[in-house]
Amino acid sequence: MLDKLKHYVLVAKPGIIGGNLISAAAGFLLASRGQLDGVSLPGTLGGISLVVASGCVFNNCIDRKIDRKMLRTRNRALARGLISLKAALAYAALLGLAGLALLRAVTNPLAVAIVLAGLVIYVGLYSLYLKRNSVYAVLIGSLAGAAPPLAGYCAVTGRFDLGAVILLAIFSLWQMPHCYAIAVLRLEDYTAAGIPLLPVKQGIAAAKKHMVGYILAFMAATLMLTLGGYTGYCTLAVATGLGLSWLYLAWPGYRAAEERLWAKKLFIFSILTIFTLSVMMSIDFTAPVPPGMLLSCAP
């Protein structure tokens, strides 16, 4: 019984849920600017977590056959037949419906629509079709990855404003070098499974160029948090330092002798980058001010 329960927990990918919880909380806290109540934050995070879990279970259902071809994923419950497809689909649907219902109860239609759109993009566009057919599937999938922080933000504001655009850009752009680093690190797995990621179809050299470009774009997007009046100069300093450090790690990739080691370092630093930036957004918020006025770290 405990083993069965463990399989159901793992098929929902708790690590991914945790990462999305952090980013969703960052978006919520950035928008709320310290004005919190005891219901909206836990309700929003709970609803988003359930929908993210739903997407992960649906993804496992869709990928069960290709998971068997990859060393990293061959022991997943659905790949091994430890959970039936029918039970997993019902489980995913239940999680999704519960999450959307909770979000509808504690947030607003815009936040619900964003989370639902993220689920549709991840399951319907990315997992079902693009992942197997397009070299740029990750680019579309990144929109789904940006849904949790965006929904957290809009759960508070109720509108899609400049802050929402900045968050969408930051979290979408961040995922590109993050995912390409995984692809380089697990190149043999993705090749064996026939997944046409950029490093697989166009080579690692092409992926490196794209990674540097996306990191530069990510840096520009993070600066807009402060320039747009949403965070203070502390976030500006931290974001600049993180971006430059990430770029410094990526640049040697052009001549890296051990590409897997290089990709692993880049992958780990990408997680540190988005975690640190999420923390800064949560604590260094400030009220919007007219352009040109001096911004400082929020209390």
Image (spheres, rainbow, N blue to C red):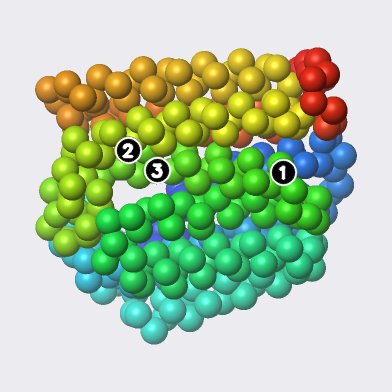
Task: Say whether disc 2 or disc 3 marks the residue closer to the N-terminus.
Answer: 3
Name the side, left or right, on which 263 lies relative to 58: left
The amino acid sitting under disc 2 is: His
State the CA–CA distance, disc 1 to disc 3. Answer: 22 Å
- Around disc 1, counting alpha carbons within 10 Å, would you say few (fewer than 14), some (14 to 19), or many (20 or more)? few
Q: Which of the two marks, 2 or 3, is nearer to us in this view?
A: 2
Q: Position of residue 92 (x, y in %)?
A: 49, 73
Badge 2, how many Cα within 10 Å: few under 14, some, many 20+?
some
Residue where numbered disc 1 is placed: 162
Relative to 256, is 280 on the left or the right? right
x, y percent for residue 61: 35, 72
Residue type marked 1: Leu
Residue depicted at 17% across the width and 21% down the height = 255
Q: Amino acid at mark 3?
A: Met
Residue denoted by label 2 = 210
Residue 86 vs residue 219, the one in the foreground? 219
Q: Is residue 285 left or right of residue 194?
A: right
Q: Looking at the image, is 238 positioned above or below residue 162? A: above
- Between 125 and 11, which is closer to the camera in this rendering? 125
